[in-house]
């Protein structure tokens, strides 16, 4: 069962948030409170209609919510301590997927899903500050997304412009010296968004402590094609010799020039594909697919992705 998050009180730990009485089989918080395996007990209880009603009432009660919050806070602290003892990824790239499905399962409009998705970026950026992860790249809008309905594209463009404009006045951006780059075909975007993008990039271009890359009107194949075209132009002008072309040369012509390749690529919503994202840069990235919609991503999900990355042995083809 894919986890979703209540827009008001509850967080996805075993509660049916759609308004019905179905009880999820996922109850990590209850197991943590009990301190023992209780699968058989749960199965016995939910066989009866009375048991289902009692459990449904408990999972919706303020007592359960209080206990959930406290247990979750404790688990988050323990996981954070564990993650902090091992090398952290320098660069995390995220394919933010599941806004519309998140909204649909909560009975909300798809517009609301995109709004919650936009706000989640700010939250994840704070997590990166907390951990000291220096580079974050988010896949906000692909070249293929232009094929969506005109209304949805306009809504997304409006939200993106709003976020870019707000970033200019965001104290966290300036306090933490975050350089913001927009990766993609800016010339394919509306003029007002092009202006907002150029403005925030110019405003933060001197910052070097953190990097936030927003893939907007982005396609991995398109990025490589553009790099080839630019190299061809420089060869024609005599600025580049064919024999001198190397991996380092190609990387220098990409949107991410000067940045390390992603150590970890995280995709939300349970889908397991790359979707034309950072095709050159991900050659040796670790991939992690999270079975939770993007707006419902919690810090623990983020930390678990990092902990999984830390447990893998990166060989880089050796």
Image (spheres, grey):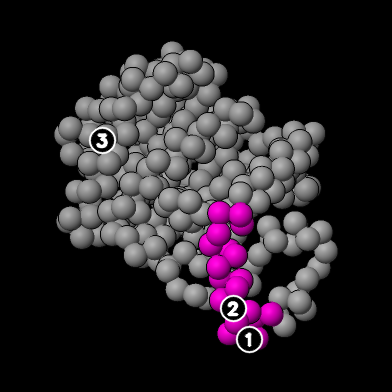
The quadrant where residue 199 appears? top left
Residue 294 visible somewhere in the drawing: no
Instruction: Left or right? Give the position of 249 relative to 152.
Output: right
Residue 91 visible somewhere in the drawing: yes
Q: How dense is the environment of label 2, judged by Cα within 10 Å: few (below 14), some, or many (20 and up)?
A: some
Whether residue 100 is situated above or below residue 308 in the rendered picture: below
**CA gap, disc 2 to disc 3?**
47 Å
Residue 310 percent location from the top left of the image: 75, 44
Look at discs 1 and 3 and give the one toward the viewer.
1
Q: Which residue position holds label 3?
A: 161
Q: Which residue position holds label 1?
A: 48
Q: How dense is the environment of label 3, judged by Cα within 10 Å: few (below 14), some, or many (20 and up)?
A: some
* Main secondary-structure element of the magenta-colored stretch: helix
Q: Residue 7: within the magenta?
A: no
Which range is magenta? 45-64
Residue 105 percent location from the top left of the image: 40, 66
**Which residue is located at x 35 percent, y 54 percent?**
113
Most extreme residue toward the bottom is 48
Whether residue 308 is situated above or below residue 100 in the rendered picture: above
Q: Which residue position holds label 2?
A: 52
Q: Earlier in the sequence, mark 1 or mark 3?
A: 1
């Amino acid at each position: 069962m894919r986890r979703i998050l209540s827009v008001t009180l509850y967080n996805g730990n075993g509660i049916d948030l759609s308004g019905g009485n179905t009880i999820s089989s996922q109850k990590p918080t209850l197991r943590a409170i009990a301190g023992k395996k209780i699968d058989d007990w749960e199965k016995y209880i939910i066989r009866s209609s009375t048991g289902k009603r009692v459990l449904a009432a408990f999972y919706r009660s303020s007592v359960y919510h209080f206990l959930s919050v406290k247990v979750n806070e404790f688990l988050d602290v323990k996981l954070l301590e564990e993650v902090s003892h091992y090398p952290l990824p320098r660069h995390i790239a995220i394919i933010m997927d599941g806004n519309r499905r998140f909204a649909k399962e909560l009975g909300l409009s798809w517009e609301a899903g995109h709004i919650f998705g936009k706000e989640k970026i700010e939250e994840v950026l704070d997590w990166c500050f907390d951990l000291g992860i220096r580079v974050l790249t988010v896949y906000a809008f692909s070249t293929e997304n232009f094929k969506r309905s005109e209304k949805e594209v306009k809504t997304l463009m409006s939200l993106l412009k709003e976020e870019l404009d707000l970033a200019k006045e965001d104290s966290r951006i300036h306090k933490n010296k975050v350089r913001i780059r927009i990766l993609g075909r800016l010339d394919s975007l509306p003029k007002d968004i092009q202006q907002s993008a150029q403005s925030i990039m110019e405003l933060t271009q001197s910052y070097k402590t953190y990097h936030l890359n927003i893939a907007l009107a982005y396609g991995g194949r398109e990025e490589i094609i553009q790099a080839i075209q630019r190299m061809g132009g420089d060869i024609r002008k005599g600025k580049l010799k064919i024999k001198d072309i190397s991996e380092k040369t190609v990387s220098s012509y990409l949107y991410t020039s000067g940045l390390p390749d992603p150590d970890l690529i995280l995709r939300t919503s349970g889908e397991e594909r790359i979707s034309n994202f950072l095709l050159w840069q991900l050659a040796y990235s670790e991939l992690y697919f999270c079975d939770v919609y993007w707006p419902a991503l919690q810090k623990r999900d983020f930390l678990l992705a990092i902990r999984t990355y830390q447990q893998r042995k990166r060989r880089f083809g050796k």
